[in-house]
Amino acid sequence: MSDLNRVYADFPQQADLSEQAMYLLQQQPDGLPEYALLQALRKAHSSHLPQLELSDKLVLFRSHFVLFNALYRLRDQLWQTQQAFLSIDPLCIRLQPYVAGSQALGQHDPLRDYYLDEAHLRNTTGDDVERLLTSFWTRMHSGEEKLAALELFELQDPITPQRIKQRYRQLVSLHHPDRGGSQTRMQSINQAMEILQRYYC
């Protein structure tokens, strides 16, 4: 039996999504991009994720939300028990050794707050996702382009060229059509990047 087959044979089907994600990350010491982790969980037939086409924008949003909710819960748990530090970045989700005081979780993290509030999952519809895209283009053409771009990138002060580029890479990783994302969404992301580069880079 190959290593990959062994990984799936030993996959903890009855565990919650946090434990399932941790199991797969333990097999990959160098970490995994979000899309690869999502695909690995789907291949292992995790019952916590919708087994529908990720080309559907709402399915992609819900899969992404459920996974990040589980990852933030796992990060809190690992930190509190001093087992490890979970680095959460769409380009590389990775388990790292726990080092006291070096990776404090005490700072306010708006993304953590967002993903741990499951009302966002329950209340976001396909129309909401479409409205987000429509709102971006409408506001951009009405002269509010910078504000619309910042909202699309979910950026708040302090805004630096480095943060803009990092967020752009994260959004591309999540929404590129080659990874199951939407072409329309990618056009919005690229347009927002061009706008922010004019103002900040």
Image (cartoon, rainbow, N blue to C red):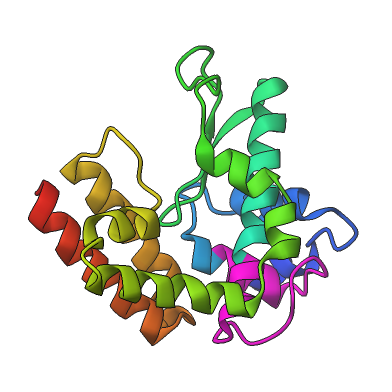
Q: Residue at x 60, y 79 (%)?
A: 127
Q: Relative to 13, does residue 54 appear above or below in the rendering?
A: below
Tell me where residue 128 sits by quadrant: bottom right
Above or below, 77 relative to 12 = above
Position of residue 149 measured from the top left corner of the image (x, y, whole percent) = 29, 60
Q: Looking at this view, is 48 or 175 the one in front?
A: 175
Residue segment shown in magenta: 37-63
Q: Residue at x 61, y 39 (%)?
A: 113
* Image-based side of 124 in relation to 188, left or right: right
User: From this viewpoint, which residue is outermost toward the front?
Assistant: 142
- Across the whole image, how many numbered discs are drawn on residues? 0
Does residue 67 belong to the magenta stretch?
no
176 w.r.t. 121: above or below:
below
Residue 165 lies, in percent from the top left, at 23, 52
Q: Position of residue 176 (x, y in %)?
A: 38, 77
| Residue 1 seen in the current view | no
Query: Is residue 39 visible in this depiction of the protein?
Result: yes
Residue at horizontal 83%, vertical 70%?
Answer: 47
| Quarter of the image that includes the N terminus | bottom right
Residue found at the very far top of the displayed protein: 101
Q: Magenta segment: does it hold 41?
A: yes
Residue 42 picture quarter: bottom right
Occupied quadrant, residue 193: bottom left
Q: Position of residue 77 (x, y in %)?
A: 72, 31
Residue sitting at 61 percent across and 53 percent down? 68
